[in-house]
Structure formats: structure tokens, C-alpha cells
Amino acid sequence: MHEKTSNQLIPKVVHSSLESLHLPFIQKEQPNYETICTILQQFEHHFLDRQANPIWETSNSQEYIEETSFANRNAIDWLTKLIASPLDWINVDLQREEIIERAAKCIAAACGKVASGPIIRDWSFPAPPGSNKPITLKIRDSTLLDDDVGFKTWGAAYLLAKRCTSGQAMPLDKIQSTSILEIGTGTGLVGLTCAMIGCPSVLLTDYHLNVLSNVAYNVNLNQLQNIVKVEKLDWKEVANGVKQELQQNFDIIVGADIVYEVAHANWISKVIKQYMKKDGIFYLMVPLRPTHTLEIELFERCMEEQGFFLQYRQDQQGLDDFIGIQNYRYYEFRY
């Protein structure tokens, strides 16, 4: 097994900072409507626009954490005081209502939530080797206000998709000459990225029907209906020997952030064995959450018991909206 650890996040990006923004004392200075709106506009740009166009990489993770943490704490504190204030020095009722509504949305966005529901996010990856055309996709994504994790794009999916476009996860000629199965597809970012690179056939699978409906929407949104198909796949039934409609085997199977329950560790290894061709390969990216150490250890053991060979493993750091800095582990398993 080839194992490598990397804590470097690339490329370096410039984050908009709120540190230099003057936040007047609400009751003491009683800022007027125009001043408050100017400040709210800065918050909206920083928090709301960042959700539609996520930046999940930085070359200096500690700097990013400190800047974001500082900005969030001060912004939320000021916005909370603004909402709690009667704003009685602003005489127009509609102006006061507008301020409260905009401030509340900014607080929600700063916490990784948007009350208005799903958003269309633009995702972009550098051009793959041998190409001068960047990979761009649109993904209908949800927020933490929704109950099901499958409606949200998480950091592991982004990191695995990026590895696919760069040729790190799998050779590009391999992607472009075989069919790919994604299990636990969520919003479909990884599988759709493979299709954009040139994979001739991609099958996206999940268990929840509402998640499948959303990923089908994303397939259509990116006009990939001729390449990408969507099907339900029940891991538990596969593990228990229940016959599934899906009968095809694949050279490549991919998954991102799919080991978050103890039962998954056992089910996934059996699903991969069921649908992988001889000499096939399974590419996986998972977050290393402190609360899920047991699940990851059990998953690795179950894969070994099912006869899989761990060809490569690499730990790295990454970002996402809801967690912030997160440690991840990338795997390549052969059968």
C-alpha cells in the first residue's frame, strides 16, 4: 500500500475580509437607515454570495480559520444587537422591517443556513491535463435547514471531484473509456464531474427517492441526460442478498462521505464486491470526523475481510461551508 499525508491546500485564494468594516454601536451611535444598509450589503456579499459560489480551498488553513471565525463572531454579535434594538430613531416602518429581515438572513447565512431553501451553486475545476477547457457545473444544493444530508454538497465530494479532474484519482484515459458507478451520490457532484470530463456512461445511485429526484434535476440542469442515469440502490438489501434491479458490473466505483453509520461499514464493502468487476477499483473520499472514528476503522476492516486490497491512502485537509476545516482520507481499493 502506498500511503501519503498532505496538509497543503492549494491554490491560495483571497478571502473578502470584514475586519476593516466599521460597525457602529447600535444604541450609542444610532446609525441611520442608509448606513445600516451599506453595512448589511457588505455582510450579504460576504455570507450570501459565498454560499452560491463556495471557496473550499486555501493555502493557509489557519489564516482562513482565524479570519472567518473573527468575521463571523463580530458580524453575528452586531447583527443580533441590531435585531434586538427597537430602531426607534428610524421613523419609517418599512425601513425598520427591511433591516430586520436582511439582518436575519445574514445571521442564517453566517451559520451555514439559508431560510429561502435550495440554491443553484456554480462549481468550477481547472482544465484537466491535455485540455484547455475548465470543468464547470451547476448543482442544486440545499442547506442545513433541510433534514436530509443527501440534499447538500459536502467537502468530500468536492475533493474527490477535484482529484478526478486533475487525474490524481484515476487516469483520465480510464475515465473516458469505461462506465462509472457512484454510490451514495447525494447531489451528484462527483459523478457529474466524471461525465463532464468525458466518461461515456455514469450511473448515479442513492437510496432516498427525494435525493434521487434532486440529483436527476442536476443531471438535466447540466444537460447530461444522454450520459448520466439515476437509479435507486439499497445497500442493506444488497448486503442481505436481496436481488436488485441493477445487475451491471463496473470497472470504476466512486463514493464520497458515505461512511457515517456503523451499518454502512459492512454494507458498503458488500455493495462494492457485488458490483465491481475483477481488477476493478473503488475510489473513496471520507471526512475523518472525531465522532466517527469507529465507523472508519470498521469500514477498513470490512473491506479487507471482503478481499479488497488497499492500494493507496492519503490524508489531507479541506473546507466546506458547514464544517469549516476538516481532515479527510482518500482511498483506492482494488479487488
Image (cartoon, rainbow, N blue to C red):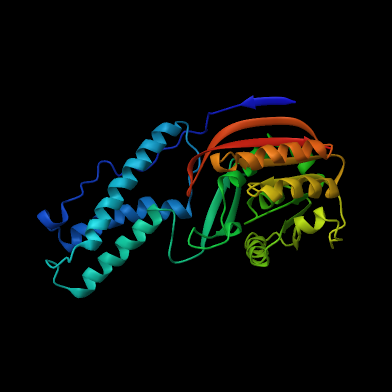
Q: Is residue 135 left or right of residue 76?
A: right
Q: Is residue 131 left or right of residue 201?
A: left
**Residue 251 location (% of width, % of height):** 83, 44
In which quadrant of the rendered image does the N terminus lie? top right
Q: Residue at x 71, y 45 (%)?
A: 265
In which quadrant of the rendered image does the C terminus lie? top right
Is 57 or 222 nearer to us in this picture?
Answer: 57
Q: Is residue 91 left or right of residue 142?
A: left
Q: Residue at x 24, y 52 (%)?
A: 78
Q: Residue at x 71, y 41 (%)?
A: 299
**Residue 124 location (% of width, % of height):** 56, 47
**Residue 258 location (% of width, % of height):** 66, 48
> Looking at the image, can residue 218 be seen?
yes
Q: Residue at x 28, y 47 (%)?
A: 74
> Looking at the image, can residue 165 be seen?
no
Q: Is residue 78 left or right of residue 273?
A: left
